[in-house]
Each structure stands twice: as structure tokens, then as C-alpha cells.
Amino acid sequence: MTKKHTLFLLLFTACLGLGATGLLQSCETKAEKGKSEHAAATAAEGAAAVKRLPFGKLKNGTEAYLYTLTNKHNTQATFTDYGGRLVSLQVPDKNGKMTDVVAGMSGVAAYASNTDAYFGATIGRYGNRIANGKFTLDGKEYTLSVNNGANTLHGGKKGFQKVMWEAQQPDARSVVFQYLAKDMEEGFPGNLHVKVTYTLTDENELRMDYEATTDKPTVVNLTNHAYFNLNGEGSGDILGHRLQINADTYTPVDATLIPTGKLAPVAGTPFDFRKPTPIGASIETENEQLTNGKGYDHNYVLNKEKSTGMTRAASVTGDKSGIVMDVYTLEPGLQFYSGNFMKGKNTFKGGSKDDYRTAFCLETQHFPDSPNQPSFPSTVLKPGETYRTSTVYKFAVQK
Ligand code: GAL
């Protein structure tokens, strides 16, 4: 390692000691540092305290920014307008130590050059896969941008994760991202206006409210693709996390991760997370579905607890931190992805690599390939209708 590298690393690590958000603020100027130390106090003063911070430039010169939300517990969520993306989330662990539970990168250039473009991003126009990049709507066949073998994944080559969103931060508790996906962008019909509002509540909930309208019939399936490690970003694999998913069935997939169309019971299989179970308990079991997914990469069909309102979808506990994350959603499905494609090729903001299974995703969603699966809940949106959905990630510590 050269001296220059060592110096950079030292500086980087020193900055990170202050926490990811603190870092990005404190590495600006001394005046900024003073402000970041009083972030909680100033946040409470309202809109006057809200400001964005630079997050670097894309190759084409476009500048990206960071937006920080803070609540009364000093919990902090940081977002960037590149991909309408969650960059970090600092929550207290069982000892009160602030822990960054979201894996993210140190600047916009790192996100743009990442081998996995999805870290923390808002995903659309269609979350997860559409078989062979084709679907038929009102008798017309549409051909999409294909980016995952023969299939379309997460909206195509330039899904919502790779575009700049227009950002507004009305107050210290929320940030609003908007994006207009043009008619036929990535092959999807209709100008789709998308709005995502992220809110950090005093109950330590990160709330995501999505809205979309179109001028032609289209398909929509929006989600957030945060990669979590509840023991903290870069603190080893997630196999010891205890996971509970409120689902009796899931949608099995073929070898290209397209659902077969059937719903399979989880009972008696490695897919049974109805009771809290370590993620690693059965992940290496000989099982065709685990082979197809290279681990867990499956859509769970959520049990509906009541006819209206949000369903409690899942609960996860970090075995070392005691941090508990509960997931609530209006969506019918939940993609549980155990980080099987992570290969240590990208560097997180804390300096560690994105090693195999060092983070997991719980993406609330409609089922993969719904546009080609008549028995799945519909993802069609028509002009005059408003797509609305919400998801909450709620944080606490194990008692
Ligand atoms: C998941 C998807 C996985 C993988 C991951 C991103 O949502 O189901 O197969 O593509 O995103 O790497």
C-alpha cells in the first residue's frame, strides 16, 4: 500500500468513526462539523435546518446530493437523489451504540460503477423479473430491455436505480423523490410519474409511501432495495440473524428465477420462517429451490392479517446487536434475498467489501413476472388511476 493510500484510508476510517452521516457532514468543513454535532437539535427547529450535502458527480458532470432525516432519538437516515436511494440508517443497538444497518457506498461515483446497481435504490418500473423481457397488455406485446440472462430484472438496464430523481425535503423528517419515466422507456408503455416519500418517525420507523400515475395502460411494481446487516454494515455474514416471515406459502422459481406460477407451502421445507429462525439454519440444505436461487431469493406470499391496512410481513433480529427490524406493508409479497450474488467486488462506505451473504434484502412487492401470470395479483395501472402503496421498516432492540 502506498503512503497516499494509507493516508486516505486513515482519513476515511477516522471520518467513519463518526458514523456514515456524520462522516459526510464532518468531512466537509469545520463549520459543517459543528453543525452536524447539533443535528438533532437543529432538526427539531424545522425546515430552516434542512439542507442537502454534496455527494459527488456522475461521469457526465451531474451532481448528486445527500439528504438526511433525523428524529428525536437521533436516529438518522441518509438518502441520495441518484436512484432515490437509502445510503445509511443509523439506529441504536442494545447498548445504545449507533449502528449503520444499511450497506451503502461513499459517493455517487461508487454507486454508478458498482457491479450491483441496486443498493438502497428505489426499484421500478417493475421490481424483480419479467420472463423473456416480454408481456402482453390489451392485446399488444411489449418487448423490454433485457438485463438478466433472457429476463428483465428491476426495470431493465437503466431502471430507476440509475437515474437522477428530483428531490425535495419539506422538513427534517421527510424527503420526497419524483421521477418521470417516459413512454416506452426500457420498453414499458406510458409516461409514468412516480413519487416516493420517505419519512422517519419518532417511533423509529422508516416509512415509504409510493404514488404513480400513467397516461397509457402499463404495469408497475415499486419497491426499495436496501441491503441490511442489523449487526452493522461490514460486520460479517448475516447467517446468524433470526428471521421470521409471516407467510404460509411462497412462489417457487425455475433456474432463471422466474416463478413457475404455483404457490408452494413452506411447511416442512427450508423456506419455513413462520417462527424466528437463523437465516443460515437450512440455507445449505439439498433442495432444488435453494439451488435455483443459489440460496434464498424467493417471493413469499404474505398472510393477510386483516382485510385493510398494512400486514406485518417480517421481523429480523441482529444476533450481535440485538437490533430488531419489523417490516409492515400493503404489498401482497416479500422478496427474501440472502445476498447470494455478493462477491466482494464493491467497497462499502465503512471500507469493508460486499462479501458473500454479508447483507440481506426484504423487498416488499407484487409477485415477480405478474404481467405474464394471470393467477397472480394484477400489476396493471390505467390512466385515471393512482398507484399507491406503503411499507414501513420499524426498528427497536430486543428486550
Ligand atoms: C434481488 C433479486 C436477486 C438479485 C438482487 C440484486 O431482488 O431477486 O436475484 O438480482 O436483487 O443483486
Image (tube, rainbow, N blue to C red):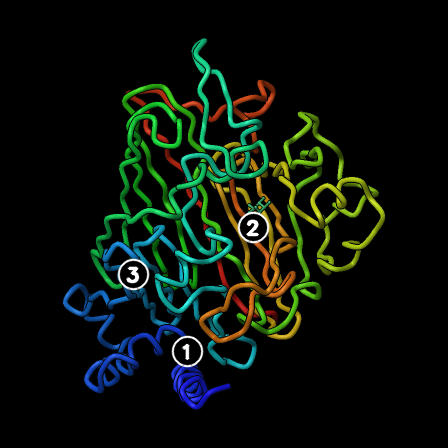
Tell me the distance, in whole angstroms, between the alpha carbons under discs 3 and 1: 19 Å
The residue labelled by disc 2 is 362
Residue 235 lies in what quarter of the image? bottom right
Q: Which residue is mark 3?
A: 173
- The residue pinned by badge 1 equals 19
- Mark 2 Cβ inside 8 Å of ligand 1: no
Query: In the image, residue 209 lies at what x, y percent?
Result: 37, 45
Residue 370: percent from left, percent from top? 54, 26
Q: Quadrant of residue 110?
A: bottom left
**Is label 3 or label 1 in front?**
1
Q: Does residue 31 appear to the left or right of 320 in the view shown?
A: left
Residue 371 shown left or right of residue 315 in the figure: left
The structure residue drawn at horizontal position 57% and vertical position 67%, both measured from the top left corner, is 230
Q: Nearer the viewer, mark 2 or mark 3?
A: 2
Under mark 1, the amino acid is: Gly
Is label 3's Cβ within 8 Å of ligand 1?
no
In this rendering, the answer to whether 139 lies above or below 277 is: above
Does residue 140 lie above or below 18 as drawn? above
